[in-house]
Image (cartoon, rainbow, N blue to C red):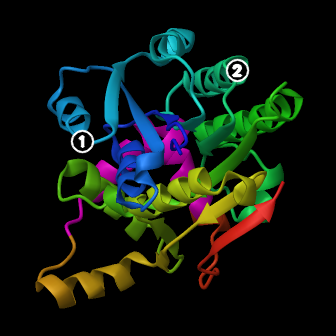
Amino acid sequence: MSSSPRKNLLITGATGKQGGAVVASILACEQASSFNIIGVTRDSTSNGAKKLASLPGVSVVEGSFSDIPAIFAKVGPVWGVFSVQVNSDDEERSGKAMVDAAVSHGVQHFVYSSGDRGGPEKSHFDPTTVKNFAAKYNIEKHLIAQATLSPQRMTYTILRPVTFFENLTPDIHGRGFTRMWEQLGPKKLQFVATADIGWFAASSFLDPTGHAGSAITIAGDELTQSEADATFKEVTGQPMPIGPCVIANAVKLVLRDTAGDMCTRLSRTFEPGSKKTKESGEL
C-alpha cells in the first residue's frame, strides 16, 4: 500500500525567529515525514536560507510580501500556511494579501501569528490604539471572514504570543528594551519563547481539526524587571544589561507607532499579578 502524499507547508519568516521555530518544531515531531516544508525568504543566497535548505524535507523559495501571488505561483499546490509579518506600515496589507492568496490557491489550513492585546477576551474585540496591534486585529478579522466564505472552507488557527524573551539581548536594542521594561516599575510584563510559538503552530498543522477556529494566547512567564534582574544575577553573577534612560526614551519616540505606544499602553493597563496563561478561546 502506498503512503499518503506529503502535505506542502508554506512557512513565511522561515529564516527568522518565529518561522524558524515552526520549521524546527515540525522537523522534531514524529510526523515530520508527512510534510514538505517550503520556507519563504527574501534572499535565497543568504547563509540562513542556505542552512535552512540543507535540512531534510525543506526547500526555500525567494519571495516578497509585495507580490504574494508570485510566491504561490512558484511553489504549486499548498496544503498549509504559516503567516507572520514584520511590524511595518505594510503589515496589514501584506497580512490580508497572504490570506487572500491562500484562499484563492485552495489552502486547507492557515496558521496566523498575531499578537496578544490583553488576554483572550480583550484580544477578540479590542484592536487598541497601538498601530501594529490594530493591524494584527484587522488581519485576524479578515482571516475569519475569508476562511468562512472560502470554497474549500479553509480552517485556521490564530496564535497570539506576548513579548518575546529573545528581545532580551546584550546589544543596544536589548538594553533599550530592558530599560523600557524597568520603567514599568512594579507592573509585570508577560514573555514567551519563540520556540513555544513554533510548538503551537506545529500542533495546529498536526491536528487542524482540533485547532480549527481557535485563538490561542501564549505566555510562558510574567515578571517585573527587578524580578528578572534578581534571577539574572543569581544565575550569571552579573546584573542584567540595561541601557540609559535616554535610549529607552528615544526608542519610545522613534518607534511610537509600535514599541513606544506598546510600552505606554502596558504601563497603563497591566496590573501586577496578572495570570500566566496558555489559553485557547473560540472565536
Above or below 113: residue 14: above
**Residue 57 image point, x, y percent:** 33, 39
Q: Is residue 22 visible?
A: no
Q: For mark 1, does the 10 Å Cα neighbourhood hold few (<14), some (14 to 19), or many (20 or more) residues?
A: few
The residue depicted at 34 percent of the width and 56 percent of the height is 167
Look at label 1 and name its amino acid.
Leu
The residue depicted at 41 percent of the width and 48 percent of the height is 33
Magenta segment includes 251 = yes
**Residue 236 image point, x, y percent:** 13, 82
Q: Earlier in the sequence, mark 1 or mark 2?
A: 1
Q: Which residues are magenta?
A: 241-266
Q: Is residue 112 visible?
A: yes
The residue depicted at 67 percent of the width and 40 percent of the height is 109
Look at label 2 and name its amino acid.
Asp
User: Horizontal placement of 283 versus 195: left or right?
Assistant: right
Pick the front one: 135 or 96: 96
User: Horizontal placement of 166 versus 268: left or right?
Assistant: left
Above or below 244: residue 11: above
Determine which of the numbered discs, if any, sits on residue 55 in the image. Answer: 1
